[in-house]
Image (cartoon, rainbow, N blue to C red):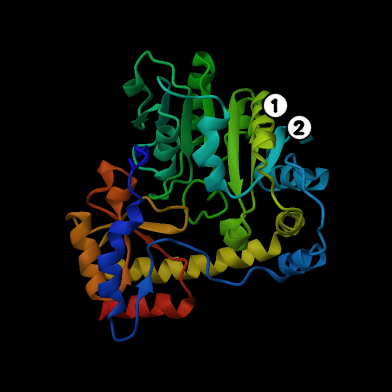
């Protein structure tokens, strides 16, 4: 019997190629220090856990649009912490984690073969995956000039950046907004690290009036609670912006049954309404970042950008796989920069989301 032919549309999952180095790092007498993925390790805030417990009795189906109070909490947080005002409840949508939204965005907005998706030269791999999923063409560039006269269907921004931690200035963001509006290109700004800033110019949302001119036309912004609130396991995120684009996302997601569970919606309200736990978590990460950065510099690394996000973009001036191997010999696992684009070949991305004990172990190994 003939087997069905399945053509692979997506690139290989990059983390699979790190297995050999992870195995070697685990052989260290004091165990592995895994700084590769950047998953939160600190406890989920008690205020959020309590909200989830109280919402545990949830027998009915949630609605895709989300509870009004969930959407209002998103809008209140944007206004209170990031100066984004003037949005209505029909301009925000809770989603099941930001990665799911990013990966499916072109599909849900009707983008397909022949369309062009543009994303940063060094970037989160899911932007490329989202284009491949619908057969669209993809271009990795930081230069609007390099795009030429063509009109991209989507242009992705990511500030603060994953992996580099770079923060784009307001003037640049405003220029990109204007460029996209002139061409009818959808601008999607991934702002999941906006509250993970450490030095230099503070990150600004693409929906801030200084960037958008007070209008959400043509703009979508993506936000996550995973980083600020240790909610990666809850899959709580939201998208906000252009009313028509939010409406189209909602219509498609209704048909697909993509609904944030009711208990998680109430947990996200508790997370967004409480800024104190986020400030405490920010302080933990700041202390870990300082320790790890100093140790890497001591070991001969140079740190580029890294003024925000949860990573240090580090280099020893060699191929990234040689650096990954050097660190693995010391029981430290990092992500090779080439995962994020060819321009990252001489860098590694090092997360500082490990526990204090594991960060201290890495510091000791790097400074021995």
Q: Residue at x 63, y 59 (%)?
A: 234
Task: State the SS at label 1.
Answer: helix
Disc sitting over residue 208 in the figure = none
Q: Which residue is mark 1?
A: 243
* Residue furthest to the front: 1
Task: State the SS at label 2.
Answer: helix
Query: Vertical placement of 346 versus 116: above or below?
Result: below
Q: Residue at x 69, y 39 (%)?
A: 93
- The residue nearer to you, when weighing 255 against 16, is 255
Residue 94 image offset from top left, x and y in percent: 68, 44
Q: Which residue is mark 2?
A: 90
Query: Vertical placement of 201 versus 110: above or below?
Result: below
Residue 297 in view: no
Residue 255 image offset from top left, x and y in percent: 67, 34
Mark 2 surroundings within 10 Å by alpha-carbon count, few (fewer than 14), some (14 through 19), many (20 or more): some
The answer to which image quadrant residue 136 occupies is: top left
Q: CA distance from mark 2 to mark 1?
A: 6 Å
Q: Is 146 on the left or on the right of 57, as rendered?
A: left
The answer to which image quadrant residue 318 occupies is: bottom left
Q: Earlier in the sequence, mark 2 or mark 1?
A: 2
Query: Vertical placement of 357 versus 105: above or below?
Result: below
Say if mark 2 contacts mark 1, CB within 8 Å.
yes
Q: How many marks?
A: 2
For the N terminus, which image quadrant? top left
Q: Is 8 on the left or on the right of 170, as rendered?
A: left
């Amino acid at each position: 019997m003939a087997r069905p032919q399945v053509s692979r549309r997506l690139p290989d999952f990059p983390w699979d190629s790190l297995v050999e180095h992870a195995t070697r790092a685990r052989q260290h007498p004091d165990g592995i220090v895994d700084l590769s993925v950047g998953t939160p390790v600190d406890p989920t805030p008690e205020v959020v856990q309590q909200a989830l417990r109280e919402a545990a009795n949830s027998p009915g189906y949630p609605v895709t649009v989300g509870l009004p109070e969930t959407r209002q909490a998103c809008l209140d947080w944007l206004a209170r912490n990031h100066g984004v005002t003037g949005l209505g409840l029909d301009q925000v949508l809770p989603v099941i984690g930001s990665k799911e939204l990013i990966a499916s965005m072109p599909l849900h907005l009707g983008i397909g073969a022949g369309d062009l998706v543009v994303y940063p030269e060094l970037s989160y791999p899911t932007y490329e995956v989202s284009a491949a999923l619908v057969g669209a063409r993809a271009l990795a560039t930081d230069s609007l000039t390099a795009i030429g006269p063509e009109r991209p269907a989507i242009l992705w921004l990511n500030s603060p950046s994953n992996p580099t931690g770079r923060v784009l200035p307001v003037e640049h963001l405003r220029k990109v907004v204007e460029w996209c509006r002139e061409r009818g290109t959808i601008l999607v700004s991934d702002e999941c690290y906006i509250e993970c800033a450490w030095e230099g110019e503070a990150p600004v949302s693409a929906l801030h009036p200084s960037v958008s001119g007070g209008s959400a036309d043509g703009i979508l912004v993506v936000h996550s609670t995973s980083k600020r609130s240790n909610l990666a396991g809850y899959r709580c995120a939201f998208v906000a912006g252009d009313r028509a684009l939010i409406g189209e996302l909602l219509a498609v997601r209704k048909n697909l049954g993509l609904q944030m569970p009711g208990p998680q919606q109430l947990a996200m309200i508790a997370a967004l309404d409480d800024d104190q736990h986020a400030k405490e978590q920010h302080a933990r990460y700041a202390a870990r970042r300082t320790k790890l950065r100093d140790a890497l510099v001591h070991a001969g690394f140079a740190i580029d950008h890294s003024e925000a996000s949860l990573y240090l973009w580090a280099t020893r001036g060699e191929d990234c796989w040689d650096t990954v191997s050097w660190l693995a010999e010391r029981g430290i696992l990092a992500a090779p920069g080439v995962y994020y684009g060819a321009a990252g070949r001489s860098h590694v991305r090092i997360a500082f989301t490990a526990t204090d004990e594991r960060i201290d172990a890495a510091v000791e190994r790097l400074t021995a």
